[in-house]
Image: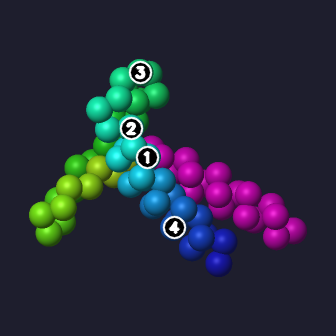
């Protein structure tokens, strides 16, 4: 169950953070933009960051597993 929650948190972060920083500048923004995938679904444009998805999912999964002990 912890993995499902971690994947959902990673998915939310992978979509929300690129949306929030769109048009920004700086080292963090440039790092995130290197791993962006642009997806068009039904006329809606999404930016998906694989880097954020992996990092947030791994961190959340580790914290939830640690908290359940």
- Identify the magenta region: 50-69
Disc 4 target residue: 8
Q: What is the x, y in percent for residue 41?
A: 18, 66
Q: CA distance from mark 4 to mark 3?
A: 27 Å
Does label 1 or label 3 sit earlier along the sequence?
Answer: 1
Q: CA distance from mark 2 to mark 3?
A: 10 Å
- Disc 2 and disc 4: Cα gap in Å? 20 Å
Q: Secondary structure at mark 3?
A: loop
Q: Most extreme residue toward the top, as rendered?
A: 26
The answer to whether marks 1 and 2 mark residues whose Cβ atoms lie closer than 8 Å is: yes
Q: Are marks 2 and 4 in contact (CB under 8 Å)?
A: no
| Nearest the eye: 31 or 24 | 24
Residue behind mark 2 = 21
- For residue 17, the mark is 1
Q: Answer with the quarter of the image where residue 9 lies.
A: bottom right
Residue 47, placed above or below residue 2? above
In the orientation shown, which residue stands out farthest toward the bottom?
1
């Amino acid at each position: 169950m912890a993995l499902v929650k971690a994947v959902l948190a990673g998915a939310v972060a992978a979509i929300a953070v690129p949306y929030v920083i769109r048009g920004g500048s700086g080292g963090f923004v440039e790092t995130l933009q290197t791993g962006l995938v642009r997806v068009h679904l039904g006329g809606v444009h999404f930016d998906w960051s694989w880097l954020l998805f992996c990092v947030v999912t791994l961190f959340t999964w580790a914290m939830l597993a640690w908290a359940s002990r």
